[in-house]
Amino acid sequence: MSHPSHLFAPFAMRSVVLPNRIALSPMCQYSAVDGMVNDWHLVHLGSRAVGGAGLILTEATAVSPEGRLSPGDLGLWSDDHISGLERCVNFIHQQGAAAGIQLGHAGRKSSIAPPWEQTRVVPAAEGGWEEILAPSAFAFSERHAVPRSLSVSEIGRIQDDFRTATERAYRSGFDVIELHAAHGYLFHQFLSPLSNTRGDEYGGTFDNRVRMLLETVRLIRAVWPEHLPLIVRISATDWLEYDGHAHPEGLGWMMQDSLRLVPLLRDAGVDLVDVSSGGNVAQPAIPVGAGYQTAFSAQIREQTGVATGTVGMITSPQQADHAIRTGQADLVLLARELLRNPYWPIEAARQLKVEVPWPVQYVRAADGRKPARLPWALGPR
Ligand SMILES: Cc1cc2nc3c(=O)[nH]c(=O)nc-3n(C[C@H](O)[C@H](O)[C@H](O)COP(=O)(O)O)c2cc1C
């Protein structure tokens, strides 16, 4: 019997070997101007790399200006964006972590104010954009704008934006691309029949609703080098199938749809599916609690054989280690817990009694590889 894996076992995707199974989950920082990286992004991403996460994923980075969720999102729609991202990538690599970029388009959710303000559409006069685009003309909520339905040629243009952004991501030095097809972003809007009522080849049947995503994955794979991995983040379900109520508009995207989609993604060249949920329906009843999405990851991994990442309310080292050891996921993504503690991986290693290398700056010369006795590391080992 092969050794069961654990949180600090390396993980290979194509030629990229992550030093452990811990990833910084993508998190919008609402801090960019014109999509450009600044010191905040370097410190936000860099400190989690110093803290020992094996894969650092950027926030959803827009492939076009109008694909941003908020005017403060990162972008990769021009060559001018490359040098700032490259600086982050270089720093992440110096810490021994892999660097991934989440590419996205927010579709009908775009042009929104940052969350520290009330949810509201940012008008063009304040840096928002004139037109919001989506598969069909339904607003996400009454606080969002009603989008205009995309023409087929506009869909092609967005797919081309993803291809070009992929080439720029490669030039920036990234090891991994994660395509954001979850949380009610544009791809999810195409997947779910609640937001896609198109009558053409991009709407209606399952095959038509997944077409936009699959075509884009193939375009990306054609320009993203063979030796580098591609991840797709999906929402396993819109959650309406679980809340026990009859929904006249239907139940949206469901787990059975995800189980059909994932093998198609694999066949198109996707190496790992990052399994999240929700985000395309404004007020679903979601039983949020510790590891509440991990069962989705486990089911997808078990039934499709495709590698998965699990995310959502994972906070303790034992919980994260358990998810890997029991085969529920290959990768654990942490968002808010890594905001609370950028050094969570180092602390997790201590609790799980695993030796991991610390940044060399924290190692006393006389101790060789032993960590320095920094004040917060003085507890029993
Ligand atoms: C401030 C913030 C920004 C986020 N931005 C993104 C994003 O850009 N892309 C994405 O896929 N998820 C985003 N998320 C969701 C997280 O990646 C993660 O899926 C979610 O927070 C659940 O994980 P957690 O319980 O560890 O926080 C964001 C979450 C937070 C807290």
Image: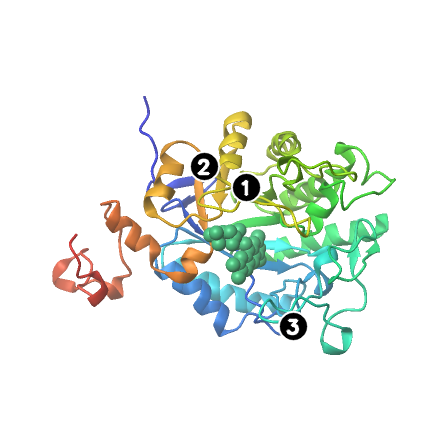
Q: Residues within 10 Å of mark 2 (few under 14, many from 20)?
A: many
Farthest-out residue, top: 1
Compared to 38, does 62 lie above or below? Answer: above
Q: Which residue is mark 1?
A: 275
Q: Secondary structure at mark 2?
A: loop
Farthest-out residue, bottom: 125
Q: Is residue 330 left or right of residue 30?
A: left
Residue kind at label 3, given as amino acid type: Asp
Compared to 41, does 293 lie above or below? Answer: above
Q: Earlier in the sequence, mark 1 or mark 3?
A: 3
Q: Where residue 207 sits in the image (x, y, percent)?
A: 76, 32
Q: Earlier in the sequence, mark 2 or mark 1?
A: 1
Q: Which residue is mark 3?
A: 34
Quarter of the picture holding the N terminus: top left
Q: CA distance from mark 3 to mark 2?
A: 36 Å
Q: Where residue 344 sits in the image (x, y, percent)?
A: 34, 55
Q: Residues within 10 Å of mark 3 (few under 14, many from 20)?
A: some
Q: CA distance from mark 2 to mark 1?
A: 9 Å
Q: Nearer the viewer, residue 165 or 134?
A: 134
Residue at left 49%, top 46%?
A: 311
Residue kind at label 1, given as amino acid type: Val
- Mark 1–mark 3 contact, CB under 8 Å? no
Q: Is residue 92 left or right of residue 303?
A: left
Q: Nearer the viewer, residue 364 or 167?
A: 364
Q: Which residue is mark 2?
A: 329
Q: Where residue 270 sits in the image (x, y, percent)?
A: 58, 38
Residue at left 79%, top 44%?
A: 196
